[in-house]
Image: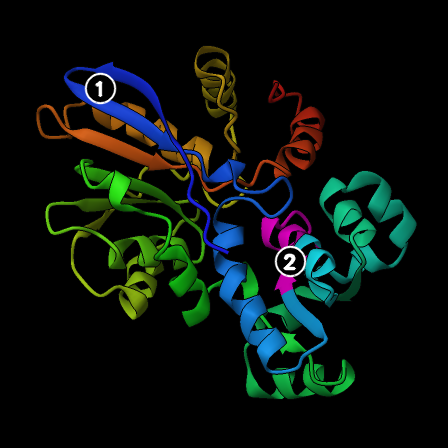
Amino acid sequence: MNLTSENQFISETNGYSLSIKREDLLHPTVSGNKFRKLKYNLIQAREDGFETLLTFGGAYSNHIAATAAAGQLEGFKTIGVIRGEELGVNLAKTLESNPTLAFAYESGMKFHFISRQEYREKDEVRFRESITKTFNNPFIIPEGGTNELAIKGCEEILTDNDTDFDYICCPIGTAGTISGIINSLKPHQKVLGFPALKGGWVADEVRKYAKNEQWEIIADYHFGGYAKVNGDLVSFINEFHAEHKVLLDPIYTGKMLYGISELMKGGYFRENSRILAVHTGGLQGIAGMNIQLAKKGLPLIH
């Protein structure tokens, strides 16, 4: 199934034109880049005769929620290996306070909670052999969904309708989405990647998959790291929603659009540039983030 998303014009500022590619509207539960990443993985799993999908993630992972939903839609059993063994001590209590895991559970996903130390070893051969034996040879999808099949899916995000844009902006988690976009660029285009995490590892990950050098990492807008949010970002997200009727998630697209706004103010882009920001979805995570914001006494995302 090949789906294309519409581009929504947002604004023209300082001679720059900004539009958003509404990948978040591809599907109600498997939206944005998760739809793209899972598409060919599920096709491969079915062709190879697998009945069960197994993947990895944190307690509020968009990927966990999307894999559970996609598995249910396509007739696969799903298993989520979740970071944090304490979450499994009282599953009912965890589900009451965690909208992401509650959604995945309601979508039929079974959970396997492990310690953070074990989770750091999840890609090692010993761990993979153990998990494969324990769960009777499932089809394993990596954390965040990034692999060669995911890259192939993300190469379908841009279409011939996007050739007029000079800059394509994309948030970065595990670097799969941006790599697919880079591989489908036209010669005159450049990708700007906005990491949600701290650290210089991002560029190395992109280089594993990218087939050209038409990209740059903008590492100044992670707000302290993954899942780190402050009042300024929440205010930006709420104001953007009020003005443009587009809801942004606080982990990825909110930080990216905040960064784009700052770059536009600062004159980063060439004069008369046309900018396209890819909305990668992730809106399911807002409910969980609001719980955390309320605990800290910060304003909530509307």
Amino acid on which disc 1 is placed:
Lys
Dot 1 or dot 2, earlier in sequence: 2
Q: Is residue 244 found left or right of 262 in the rendered image? A: right
In the rendered view, would you say 48 is above or below 9? below
Is residue 121 in view? no
Q: Which of 122 and 36 is in front in this view?
A: 36
Q: Residues within 10 Å of mark 2 (few under 14, many from 20)?
A: many
Q: Residue at x 70, y 81 (%)?
A: 131
| Residue extent of the magenta highlight | 56-68
Name the residue that disc number 1 marks.
265
Query: Is residue 20 shown left or right of residue 228?
Result: left
Residue 107 inside the magenta-drawn segment: no
Q: Which amino acid does label 2 sit on?
A: Thr
- Is residue 207 visible to us here? yes
Disc 1 is placed on an element classified as helix
As drawn, the residue found furthest toward the top would be 243
Q: Position of residue 10 (x, y in %)?
A: 34, 20
Q: Nearer the viewer, residue 116 or 139?
A: 139
x and y, in percent, of residue 207 in the image: 26, 65
| Residue linked to disc 2 | 67
Residue 202 in percent (x, y) is at 34, 57
Q: In this view, does 159 lie above or below 137?
A: above
Measuring from the top left, give residue 86's x and y in whole percent. Answer: 80, 58
Quadrant in the picture for the C terminus: top right
Inter-mark Cα distance, 1 to 2:
38 Å
Which residue: 45% across, 19% down? Answer: 236
- Local crowd size for mark 1, using a 10 Å CA cut-off: few (<14), some (14–19), many (≥20): few
Residue at 45% over, 31% down? 254
